[in-house]
Image (spheres, grey):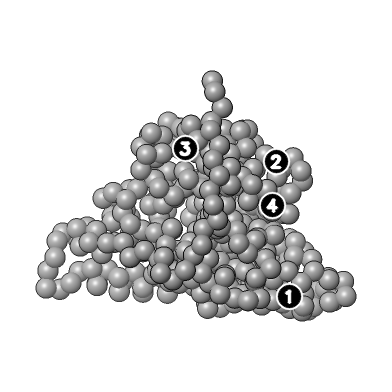
Amino acid sequence: LSSPARCRSPPTVVGASELPPRPPTMLLVILALGGTSALRPEEKLVEKLAELVGQDHSLHAPVISLKRALVSPAESADATPVVFMHGMGDAGPNPGMQSLARSVSEMYPQKYSIAVSVADGLASILEPMDRQLLEFAKAVRADPKLAKGFDAVGLSQGNLLVRAYIERINDPPVRRFVSICGPHAGIGTCPANPVYQLICPIWKLDKYGAGIAFSDYWKGVTDRTDYLAHNGFLPDINNERPGIKNQTYVDNMLKLEKYALVQAVWDTMLVPRETSQFGFWPWGAEYGGIVPMEKSEGYKSDWIGLRTLDETGRLKKLEFVGDHLQFTSEWWSANILPIFA
């Protein structure tokens, strides 16, 4: 068999004028609810979604509290800023995200840290990932304190935005990337969660084309051909398409100094939970035995540089005991904050 062709893509320049029109998600909402009416059912659904997003703290980052300064400025000379990107249903200004960013500056007073306000709340659900990526890149480039590069922490869905930014753009560059509960290999079923249960009827109308974020990392493991042909986001950033691989994605990932993949032992939001460390069910076997990252085709063939990062000691797997994103202040202080020293 011949080796897949390698291509290089030029850096993407993002400006406000490049943001595409918002997708016709509401049209699908109307269809899902049985057609138009004078009651404007799409507005009722958005109102209900907004209510659930505000109430469902399982989607939100936990509030972290450091009891004392653990590192003095003299012991930590690195001043690389840290950017936090929230997950689906969360928002940069929310208490949990703000506490995570604040914990970095409390531990390392010389560091600048920020939880970006990108695709907050409902936008994180209703906007496709490519649009959210452009907004993330725009926010990063608008902050002069990030101009020389930054470390990044992603939570849940936010990890796909950070990784897509690294692969496709990476200007300014990401130095270290901490991924917490990210669906890197996709999600194989609609989670048993109030927000998901409300949007899943929309998603099921056109699983890869519903115009919502979840469609962009859904992986129907029973039909690989359909996934590769119709999912426009995840197969691209995972370099899964047969016959051609984007070498720029590999090159940019290999610029990382550290890449930490964190899994929640009891994660009920990511199915399968091993997706947070690039594990997934084998093709054709939904709910089958997990193929771990190291035995996956993408790792063995180094499609995005995971094997090289691992072999050079830059890839690290971590876990915490708890459900999706529900780590403790103690775990955060002991396992994540030292990465930024």
Q: Is residue 163 visible?
A: no
Q: Is residue 302 visible?
A: yes
Residue drawn where x is 69% and y is 59% of the image: 176
Residue kind at label 1, given as amino acid type: Lys
- SS of the residue under disc 1: loop
Query: Residue 315: horizontal and vertical position, in percent?
Result: 70, 48
Q: Nearer the viewer, mark 1 or mark 3?
A: 3
Q: Nearer the viewer, residue 211 or 142?
A: 142
Q: Quadrant of the C terminus?
A: bottom right
**Does 40 sit left or right of 69 as displayed?**
left
Residue kind at label 2, given as amino acid type: Thr
Q: Nearer the viewer, residue 323 or 303?
A: 303
**Mark 1 to mark 3: distance in Å?**
39 Å
Earlier-in-chain disc, 1 versus 4: 1
Residue kind at label 3, given as amino acid type: Arg
Earlier-in-chain disc, 1 versus 3: 1
**Does 190 sit left or right of 301 as displayed?**
left
Q: How many marks?
A: 4
Residue drawn where x is 69% and y is 71% of the image: 81
**Mark 2 to mark 1: distance in Å?**
29 Å
- The residue where tag 4 is placed is 255
- The residue where tag 2 is placed is 308
Query: Residue 233: horizontal and vertical position, in percent?
Result: 44, 49
CB under 8 Å between discs 4 and 2: no
